Structure formats: C-alpha cells, structure tokens
Amino acid sequence: MKNITILGVTGSIGSSALKVLDNHTEKFHLHAVSANRRLDNLIEIVKKYRPDYAVCADGEYFFSQTGKTSIVCEGIPIYSGNDGMEHICNDKSDIVLNAVAGKAGVALSFKAIKQCTELALANKESVVCAGNLLFDEAAKNNCKIVPVDSEHSAIFFLLKDKSPDLIHTIHITASGGPFLNTDKREWNKITPSAALKHPTWNMGQKISIDSATMANKGLEVIEAHYLFSMPYEKINVVVHPQSLVHSMVEMIDGEIYAQLGPKDMALPIQNAFSYPDMIQNDYNRLNFLSAVTLTFLPIDMEKFRMLNFAIDCGKKGGMYPAFFNNVNEYLVMQFLNEKISFLHIENAMEKSIELLGKENFDKKLNAVEDLAEIDLLSCDIASKAVTITKGE
C-alpha cells in the first residue's frame, strides 16, 4: 500500500485524486492533505478519508475561523500556516501529488522532491518556471517526476520504450476553449463568466481563463520541452474540440500513436499513483458502443497570440518562461477582477515582453531562490504594461 500526500486537496485535481482513492482503498493510504483556505471542505475530507493529519496553508484565515493555530478533528490534527506547510513538505511519503495552482506550487515541488519517491505533478508552473533545476534536484534525490496533466500523462506513457531518435513530432491536443469559433472582433465584449465556461473540462478559475486565451497550451508546450527533453521544433499544438485524444506521438516513419480516454482527470492521476504498474478502472471508460467523432484542426496562431508569446519565451529560455508565467497570472487576476478586458490580456503581455527586453538582467536561472526576484520584476513590468496599453 502506497502512502499518498495531496497538496491542494480541495481543488478540482484534488477532488479527482480522492475519486481514485475511493475506488482503490486497498492500494493507497491517504497520509496527509493540504488546502489553502476552504476549511469547511478540508474538515469534511478529514472526516471522510481520515488522513494522518491535514494542513490549512493560510494561517491567518485559519486563526480567524478557529482562534487557534491548530485543532484536532475526530482525533486527527489540522495544522496551519507556514509551519504546517513546512511539516507536510518535510514529511516522508511514497507519492506527493502537487495540485496547488499557479506559482505558489513551485517551491512546494522542490521541497517535496527531497522526501518522496515520486512527485505526481499537476502544478505545471514548477516545470515552466524552473524546469532544469527541478529535474536536477529530482535526479539528485532519486525522485521520479510523473506528469498528471492529461496531455503530458498521455505523452509520458506513449513515449515509454520509444527511442528519442525515432520521434518526429509530439502533438499536444487543445480543445480550443470557449472562443474557438468567436470572431476576434468580439473579444472585447467577453466577460469573466463567459471565459470561465470551458466546453469540455471542469477546472479552476485561473486555468479556465488560460484555456480561453490558449496561454495554458503555451505553458504545456514549455512543460513538454522540459519533461521529455524535446526541442520546440518537434512540439506541435492541434485543436481537437472533443478532448478525447489527449495527445499523440508521431514517429519518423509517419505512424502516429494516440492516447484516447474519457474527459476525467482521475485517470491520469490513477496512472501516476500506480506507476509503473497499471490497475483496473471501473469508474469511467470511453464507450465505443456509441458514436464517437474525432475532429482535428490547425491552430490559428494569429488569433490565439498568447500561445505564440509563450513559445517564444520558452525558446529564449533562462528567466523568460517564469516571466511569462508570472505576468500571465497577474493579467488573469486583473481580468477576473474586471480591471482589464479579455483582449487586453494579450496586448499587455506583448508590451510586458517588450519592456523586459529593455531591462538589464541576467537571463540565467541559477537557483530556485532567483524566482522571487523574477516574480517582483514580472509584477512590476506587468503593472506598467497594463497602464501603457490602457492608454493606447
């Protein structure tokens, strides 16, 4: 039985992970869980799944709700704040699932690598912002990184036992988001509520907006570059509205291997938890007894410019991928708070990259500690870019 720790248990990925545990109680033991806030949800999970302990990361919020820095729920301790997160990250576990959204999850990946046999990684920012450093640290600590994103999970298993010399192209599929067929002249009218309505997946707010702009697919291209040591020239994005083919690998002889499956994040999570073995799935299967339609379309790079910006930053390397990620997070929050328009996201990103090019900075990323400085620089430049582009 493997001991599982879930960071970000109350989010959509965390919920899917609990679904895996529900169906395989004999194989996995839930050792520890964390949530940022959502204390009521966290307590429900503690009562139902009875982990050894839990952590509420937002210490101030936890204290405002309980008047304490820790409590005991039905005999199970719930810690809080930085001390609680240090405890969970420094605790031994077979598998740590990092499902914390955004750049907040990057430092957690580095801490977890030192204490677990496998990092099941749903936090793509860990790879985007510090790919080389992350994999160097994993190798040093003999920790396997297994991707949980449906696209990268598909590629991970499709590439198994295949020589890199035989790979022609990796094709990452994209649903196209809610505005695939929306005329770009209408993008200024797009509201946050409309952008959050993803056509095929039920996800958190930030990733839903990223899917609408295609920034998310850009982050996935950068992630694939680091995960699979694949040059950008061999990574392609193709629109697949049905979201049933999660990715494809094209060989040098023209054959294409594809992974098909239902739209259910529990499956790549189960594959990560059971790796290198495979276990029975009885809770969601693709039904070929009913009609299945598969459509593939080329991506319109002029329409979805955020994808272009991400790939360009990925190719520049150094601090550029982390810069793109941090600026994007800033702009998404501005849009969700209705301070900028949907179209303004890409305009401000373009201006931010232009402003960064005028800065005198060291392009190299030498240590994970450098990310804090990059974050400050990113937010400062993004703020200036928003002000400038609003006046244009």
Image (cartoon, rainbow, N blue to C red):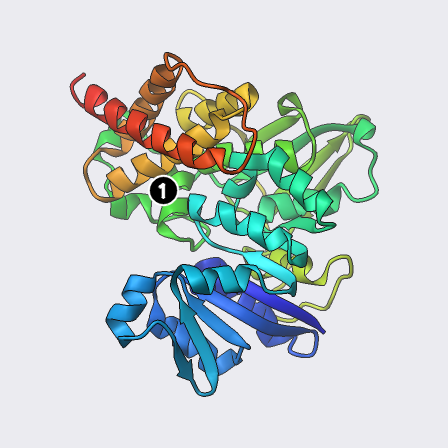
Residue lying at the far left of the rendered structure: 391
- The answer to whether residue 220 is visible is no
Foreground of the two, 190 or 331 = 331
Q: Position of residue 147 (x, y in %)?
A: 62, 48
Residue 330 higher or lower than 78, as above or below: above
Q: Amino acid at mark 1?
A: Ile
Residue 306 higher or lower than 228, as above or below: above
Q: Quadrant of the C terminus?
A: top left
Residue visible at 49% across and 29% down in the picture: 321
Residue lying at the far top of the rendered structure: 358
In this figure, which residue is indicated by the disc labeled 1?
209
Residue lying at the far bottom of the rendered structure: 74
- Write down the quadrant of residue 228 in the picture: top right
Foreground of the two, 152 or 172 = 152
Residue visible at 39% across and 53% down in the picture: 204
Secondary structure state at the residue bearing disc 1: helix
Residue visible at 72% across and 74% down in the picture: 1
Q: Position of residue 66 (x, y in %)?
A: 28, 76
